[in-house]
Amino acid sequence: MKSGIIGYYSTRFGELWERSLFDLVEESIRELLKDSKVDISRVDAIFFGNMLGGIIENNLHASAKLAEILGIHIPIFHTEAACASGGMAFHLAHNYVQSGKGKTVLVVGAEKMNDSSPEQITQALMSAASGEEQECGLTFPGLYALMAREYLSKYHYTKKHLAAVSVKNHLHALNNPTAQFQREITEEMVLQSPLVADPLGLLDSSPITDGAASVLISSDQALLKKGKSATILSSEIATDSISLMRRKSITGIEATQIAAQKAFKEARLTPADIQVAELHDCFTIAELMAMEDIGFWKRGEAGKRAGEYETLFSNGGNLIVNTSGGLKAAGHPVGATGIKQIGELYLQLTGQAKKRQIKKVRHGLAQNVGGSGGTAVVTILGI
Amino acid sequence: MISPVKVWRRQKTIRDLLGKEGVIVSWTTIFTPPTQFKHIAPYIVAMIRLEGSINIMAQIVDYSRTLQKNQRVVVVLRKLRESSPEDVIPYTIASKLI
C-alpha cells in the first residue's frame, strides 16, 4: 500500500525554559495539523517517541496525557528505545498504516532535557545502557569515546578527522531556523574544546536539548494528492546487544548495517541512489561509522573523506549529509531526533528546505541509533 | 534508585572475575560523570579482553603509567559508586596495570 508523509513540524530546538515537555508536544501537533490542513478527527492513531519523561519528570502514561491535551479517544502508543525512540515511533506508525489499521497517523517525538543538571541527565541517559556498563561509571560520551579511540587507532586517523564532522554540521545549521546552534565553528575550536570523554571533546558531542517534532503519515489518496507528499519506500529496525563490550566490533554499528541492508532491499535502491541523508551524529565518530555502516563509503575511508568535507552542502557533491545540522548543531532532544531527521528529508524531497535546499533530490535516508548501537532504524523516502 | 536487592544480585557474579587477567582494548577518561560517580571524576574506564576472550568494562585504578593498547591488567575489587548510608555497599570490579 502506498503511503507517504504529508506534513512536518518542528518546534525550535534549544534551551526552552518557558516550555514543558507537553507544551512542546502540543505545539508540535497543533501546528502540524494546522499547516497540513488536516483536522484532528481525521487522525486514526498517534505514536509518541520519548525516552526520559518517566525517569526525570516522573511522567508515565503519556498516551492518556496526550488524549487529555487534545480531547480525543483514539489509540495512542508510547515508544522507548533510548535515542531511537523517535525512529521506532515512526517505524511502528508506518506499519500501522501499512497494515490497514489506520489511514492517517500522527508521529510525534519530544524530549525535555535542560531542567536537570548535567550529572542527572548523564545518569538518566545511562539507564539505557547495560548494568555492567553503568556500574563502572561509563557514560554515553564514554562509550562512543571507546569506539572513537579504537577507530582512530585502527585506521590511523587523528581527532582532526573527527572535528570536520562538527564543522560541517554547524555550517549546515546556519540555514536551519529551528536549530539549537546557528554559529560557525572551526576545526581548531573543536580540537581545543574541553574533553568530555577523551578523545571526544565538548564540540564533538551533541548538546542537551529541549524540543519536539512531528510528521503525518497517510495512505489516504485524497490527502496525498492535496498537498506536498514524500513516499515512504522503507523503514527497517535492527537490534544488537545492549552492551558495547558484547558486540563483534566496536568500530562500526552492526544494527545500522543490518537495518540499512534491509531498507535498501525493500526500497530496491543502493547507497548510490541517495542524494540526502540525515545520520545519527550524537558524537562525531558516529557519523563516520554510519557512513561506512550504511555503505556510502568503504570501511576505513570515512576519516579521510569526512576530512575533505565531501558531504558539505556548499561542495555540491552527490550526497549531502545532515542538512538540518545533524544532532550536533540542530540539537538532540532524544525522542524528537528520529522524527526531525525524517522531517528534514521530507522538506528536501518536497522542495521546502529553503536556503538549505539540495537540487535534484530524489531519495533520502535517515539513520537513528539507540544507545551505543543496541537499536538502529533506517528509513528511506522518495519522491 | 537502585534497589539493595538488585545490588546484592549483581554482586554475586563479581567474585568469578576477581584475579582474572586481560589486555586493554580501548579506554577513555570520563570528565562528565553520572551523579553517583561525581566524587571520583575524572576517572579512566577501559574495555578489557580477559583470557578466554570475554570482554569487560572496568575502571583502571592505582595507575602511574600512561595507558597503551594491549597493556596487561588484573581484575580487582573496589567501591566506586556513591550510595546512601542505608544502601548495600555497591562493590564492583576495577582493574590494575600489571
Image: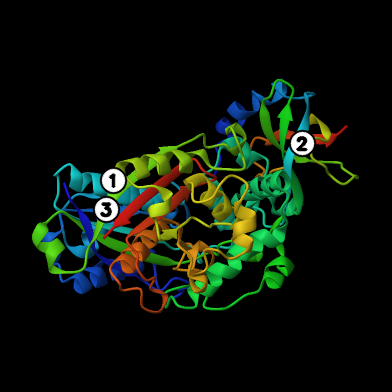
Q: Nearer the viewer, mark 3 or mark 2?
A: 3
* A351 or B18: nearer the viewer: A351
Q: Residue at x 39, y 70 (%)?
A: A358
Q: Which mark is residue A63?
A: none
Quadrant of the rendered structure where residue B14 is?
Answer: top right
> Residue A3's x, y, as percent?
19, 53
Which part of the image, by quadrant, shows the C terminus of chain A?
A: bottom left
Q: Residue at x 47, y 49 (%)?
A: A369
Q: Nearer the viewer, mark 1 or mark 3?
A: 3
Indicate which disc, 1 or 3, sits on the residue closer to the N terminus: 1
Under mark 1, the amino acid is Leu
For mark 1, what is the residue?
Answer: A92
Pointer 2 indicates a residue of which chain?
A: B
Q: Secondary structure at mark 1?
A: helix
> Residue A240's x, y, as percent?
48, 35
Q: Secondary structure at mark 3?
A: strand
For mark 3, what is the residue?
Answer: A232
> Residue A298's x, y, as percent?
56, 46
Q: What's the CA distance linking mark 3 and mark 2?
A: 44 Å
Pointer 1 indicates a residue of which chain?
A: A
Quadrant of the rendered structure where residue B65 is?
Answer: top right
